[in-house]
Image: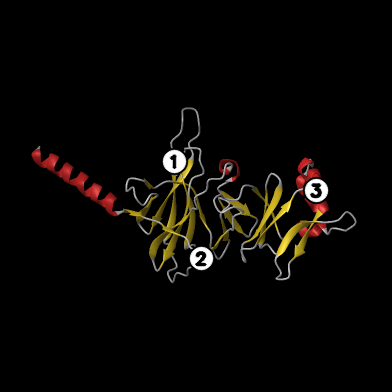
Amino acid sequence: MKTTIYLALLSMALFSCKNDENAKTYIPREITKTESFNIYSERTDTAIKIIPIEGDSKEGEQSEELFSVKFRDTLINIQTDKADSAAVVEKFSSATFVNTQRTCLLVQVADGSGLVAPFYLIVNRDEKPEIVSLYKPSNGKDDIKYTKGMVRVGRDGYIVNNDFFITNVNAKVYTLKRQNDGERIQGEFFMKSPDKQTLVFLEQNNLYQVNYITGESFTQPLSPDARKAADIYSFIQQNYMWSKEKNGVSFLKAISADKIVDISEFR
């Protein structure tokens, strides 16, 4: 009997050790102004693996699909607060590869608080996982309203929390210039320029525009008629046009009533 109990305890201990060995916690680093994460791997198998898991559910409701992430056979945990070793997450509400090499994964923490949960990049750098934080503090009064998490911009890439633009395929991350340094852009993504480099955000009274390549920005006030329009997109098509600066950067500007607009520029 004692032998049986001993073997059972030993088995449990070994199982616990195995679990500890197969999970590792990483402290993310901050991203610099512009970085590329299109890292080439000589190995043909994908090191970063997305594992679907079932989240908690309330009675009568369908459970939310969540994800964990493994690097080879090791579960990745992220310490979200450098000063608090207990602030560790292992579940994510979204997980998206942002390059064709599948060496860069964009994840959002599963957070049921109702706030916009933080995003991280999990990167295979030299066959080791690197965690990069996509976060800039903000005290904007309408952050909750305008911060949409990850917004896909056609086939070109992703806007993350109105602060970063990640190009699809080659995983280059640009930090978007804010209209005001202390707050993220207080508007919703509205459209992009014909050359796909200028992003336009619809604010309450303005079109705030930022070229993610050059970092240049321009604010175009909206006319009272634009703010009252039933279809703001159609109104902009008919009353504004793309104008190139001397350096080739395009911004959307209001035009005079007698000028003809090429609507094809908006497609």
Q: Give SS at disc 1.
A: strand
184 vs 145: above or below? below
Q: Give SS at disc 2.
A: strand
Residue placed furthest toward the right: 258
Q: Give SS at disc 3.
A: helix
Three-letter amino acid code at the position of disc 3: Phe
Residue 215's spot in the image, x, y percent?
61, 63
Residue 188's spot in the image, x, y percent?
64, 47
Q: Residues within 10 Å of mark 1 (few under 14, many from 20)?
A: few
Residue 74's spot in the image, x, y percent?
34, 56
- Report whether 80 appears left or right of 180: left
Q: Is residue 267 visible?
A: no
Residue 226's spot in the image, x, y percent?
78, 45
Which mark sits nearer the N-terminus, 1 or 2? Answer: 2
Write the residue at 57% across / 50% down: 184
Can you identify the residue that label 1 sits on? 54
Three-letter amino acid code at the position of disc 2: Glu
Write the residue at 57% across / 64% down: 169
120 vs 169: above or below? above
Residue placed furthest toward the top: 59
Number of dots carrying numbers: 3
Q: Quadrant of the C terminus?
A: bottom right
Can you identify the residue that label 3 sits on? 235
Can you identify the residue that label 2 sits on? 35
Q: Quadrant of the N terminus?
A: top left
Q: Which of the 4 quarters of the picture holds residue 157?
A: bottom right
